[in-house]
Amino acid sequence: MAAGISRRTVLFRTVSELCGPASRSNCATLILSGPTSMLLEPMSAYLLIAQKQYENTSLSGSYNVGPESSGCLTTGELADLFCQAWGEGAYWEHIGDNGPHEDTVLKLDCSKIRTVLSWRPRWNVERAVWETVAWTKAWMDGNNMLDFMERQIREYFNEFV
């Protein structure tokens, strides 16, 4: 990572700010690998789950976190979207390998988190892919990733307040 910046530091700093000074000791240290932008949706959901379960133990249990139904894409559609976001003539090619059968649709049932906790993804799949590409290009260009990730995190949380 450029300039020796730790993604873990960025997220911990942001989570601590969200938790507030009184509860910083109760904030979990979360370890990330990969662009922050593609982890914002599940991280926001996990933080909401933890908060709600702490406030009301009857909400204990497991919750699936995933996109809206409209955000479910085939691998080819996702690859097309990535290439469009990347630009510069990026393309992909499907090469069949006669591997084992896989279902054409793999989808989590996320109705519990939507119904019980009123959680919904903040970014649609297109926005998440574009933000992931922006992160990757910024990292490849040697930008200050601490500033870049902090901006993405703040945009994510502030756009819908």
Image (spheres, helix red, strand yellow):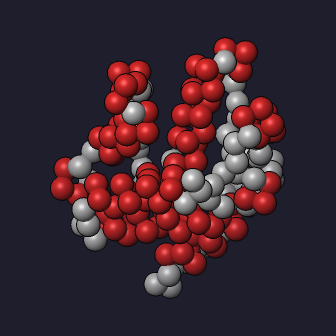
* Residue 30 showing in the rendered view: no
Query: Residue 55 in the image: x percent, y percent?
Result: 61, 20
Query: Residue 108 in the image: x percent, y percent?
Result: 76, 41
* Residue 73 showing in the rendered view: yes
Query: Residue 58 in the image: x percent, y percent?
Result: 73, 15
Give the left or right position of residue 2, taking residue 57 as reference: left
Give the left or right position of residue 7, taking residue 36 as reference: left
Report the residue that reaches farthest toward the bottom: 89
Q: Report the front residue among 62 and 161.
A: 161
Location of residue 115 (image quadrant): top right
Query: Residue 91 in the image: x percent, y percent?
Result: 56, 77
Location of residue 145 (image quadrant): bottom left
Q: Residue at x 34, y 30 (%)?
A: 21
Q: Report the front residue among 111 and 137.
A: 111
Q: Is residue 22 above or below residue 58?
A: below
Give the left or right position of residue 20, taking residue 2 as reference: right
Q: Residue at x 46, y 84 (%)?
A: 88
Location of residue 126 (image quadrant): bottom right
Q: Residue at x 69, y 66 (%)?
A: 76
Q: Is residue 55 above or below residue 149?
A: above
Report the residue that reaches farthest toward the left: 3
Q: Residue at x 34, y 68 (%)?
A: 138
